[in-house]
Image (tube, grey):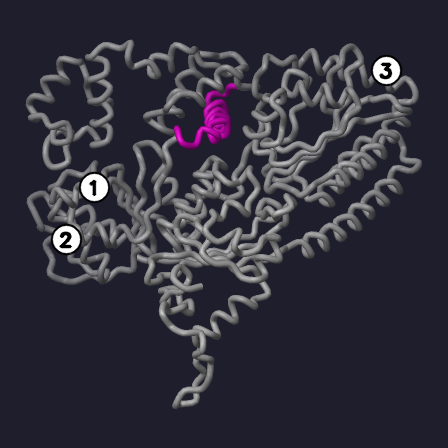
Amino acid sequence: MKGHAENEASPQGQVPLAEGKTADRACGVNDDASFVLTDATIKIFFENAPDGMVITDTEGTILHVNVEMERMFGYPRHELIGKKVEKLMPERVRSMHIGHRRMYAAKPTFRAMSMSSQLVGLRRDGTEIPLDVSLNPVQSQAGLMLYGIIRDKTELVVAQRFEWEARFERTLSELSAKFVNLCSDRVDVEIESGLQMICAALRADRATVAAIESCRDDFVATHAWAGPAIPVFPKQVLKSLLPWLVRRTLNGEATLARPHSLPEEAQREREYMETIGIKTALIVPFRVGGQIIGGMSCDAFREDQPWDALALSRFQAAANVFANALARKSADERLQRAYIEIRELRDRLESENRYLRREIQLEYKHSAVIGDSAAIRNVMKRAQQVAETDTTVLILGETGTGKELIARTIHEMSKRSKRTMVTTNCASLPATLIESELFGREKGAYTGALAKEIGRFELADQSTIFLDEIGELPPEMQSKLLRILQDGRFERLGSSRTIQVDVRVITATNRDLPVMVKDGRFREDLFYRLNVVPIVMPPLRERIEDIPALVWHFLGEMAERMGRNVEGVHAGTMKMLQRYSWPGNVRELRNVIERNLIFNPGPIFRIESRELDENTNPGLRSINEVEGDHFRTILQATRWRIRGDGGAAEILGLKPSTLEARLKKLNIVRPC
């Protein structure tokens, strides 16, 4: 392990391998009888560790492996050293891992990973093995290196498999007993209860039974169960939604599906699974007397389940139990009536290739933040972590991304949630009044101060204060804010008495504070005080998978307020909303939905394509239109403040009088 792998002690506390030291310095006892861990000892530990050990540089080049790594992956070490670590990974995950590795090298820290069946290694013979991996950075004389501890989870997975098989066999036995001699009027209720039992045994999140229509080769969902926050499968004809799966099921083929493993002809199925978040699915035909009468499916949303051909066969056995129960129920004229009801249901719900309404909830119990994309999950995870502390938080992001919502979420999850969070928009307060607003005033502090008034920081004592648009805070106020952050002390305007408060400070801005610091418009020491834990709100164009959830959230809220009944969203409208770049982010999306809900009174929500096309084709617009939109964006960001530091004129590089003249020419006025 000389050269590359021998290193000095890292800041994280790892024992170093010092370069140039000889291996014959055995561990022993020093003068004060304390144990000495030497290079020779470290090498013994490394080589004989029960887990695989690998050391790489920041580019992913393998520098050293131990004996267990050779055994685990089937490679002699000379075939690994000097190669990229991606050699030990399946092809499907290599490109993703390269991106993760680069991000980790840029900001290394200790990290343990355990991702069930998603974290696998590739042996020399082409077989895959499930793994647990822990990563740690090491600073050596040759630079930053990374070492990993890799554990083979095969035995654990096998044990879990045996446990799953036993659990599912018990479930099958219980289902069979439940449906023996079951009264026909109880079949539907018990099937839905049985779907829940199957989901529990398979660790699935929803299950559905669908029947074939009598007049054509298509399916309609008849029974369903879904866990909390999981959308129920839509009760509609399915050929237009999932044509490839319908054909396979009608042909009597069972299917184990994951989005990344579907064939090219299953493009609609892949889009559907990715849109609503299905990671793994099982679909089997429903047979009675050898004839296919429907199908049954179960879906995993929360994590990719390690289902295989055996799981598919046992799921088929459960489907057969339900099929026989339904066959008994429909042995007489009730079968014909059931088919008539299905046809009537089909006539009422004939699909226009549209999205049906469904409740979409976050795994986080904070209804204000809508979405389940990776970007939002990362924001919420960071918010949860910082909420448990009193650390200062700086929320960054474009206008309209929901910075205040995240601030409220942090407050609601904190120990200060019993008291009301106090909010202040620094851009909306005149520079002459902001000090008294924040810190309060004494009677007679200035002309017009007819009574004593406490400030926002006193109101927020034992609670949280949210300072929005912190980049607009005047320079003279920045020093006062810095003092509060340092020791929680301030004086009211017109008073020399010091007031002590216990306030948690959260700030937000859409400005580039480092640039403002460089230009001398924002105090550097204040920036570092505020930037303890930064949280970046992603723009809507980077989380388009959240748009369906946001659309339904806003439609539900506005339709109730307007007394409207919205049954669905036109598929073309939803696709158009997901293609648009949303420069105004979530706020713009809300405004577009409200405007079009007013002008389109039908039960299907739709937006005319020309409305968003005008915004997505700027090359077809006049110079005055482009300039006007740019001026409005800047004015909204500055709360329509034209003059002074941080005003619209300064940002645009214009004289205030020139900007006012242009606004008058373009007929741009501040909205009421």
Where residue 656 appears, as percent x and y from the top left, is 8, 26
Image-based side of 510 in relation to 230, left or right:
left
- Residue under label 3: 336
Q: Nearer the viewer, residue 281 or 484?
A: 281
Under circle 2, the secondary element is helix
Q: Identify the disc placed on residue 207.
A: none
Q: Find the magenta span and give its range.
A: 541-564
Eye-nearest disc, 3 or 1: 1
Instruction: Residue type at mark 3: give it.
Output: Gln
Rendering coords of residue 669 (x, y %) = 19, 19
Q: Amino acid at mark 2?
A: Ser
Three-letter code for the amino acid on which mark 1 is drawn = Gly
Measure the alpha-carbon separation of dots 3 and 1. 70 Å
Secondary structure mainly formed by the magenta segment: helix
Q: Earlier in the sequence, mark 3 or mark 1?
A: 3
Q: Is residue 183 left or right of residue 244?
A: right
The quadrant where residue 336 appears = top right
Badge 3 crowding class, 10 Å Cα cut-off, few under 14, some 14 to 19, many 20 or more, is few
Residue picked out by circle 1 = 471
Residue position marked by numbered label 2 in the rendering: 479
Q: Residue at x 81, y 19 (%)?
A: 338
Q: Secondary structure at mark 1?
A: helix
Residue nearest the observer in this picture, 319 or 345: 319
Write down the quadrant of residue 514 in the picture: top left
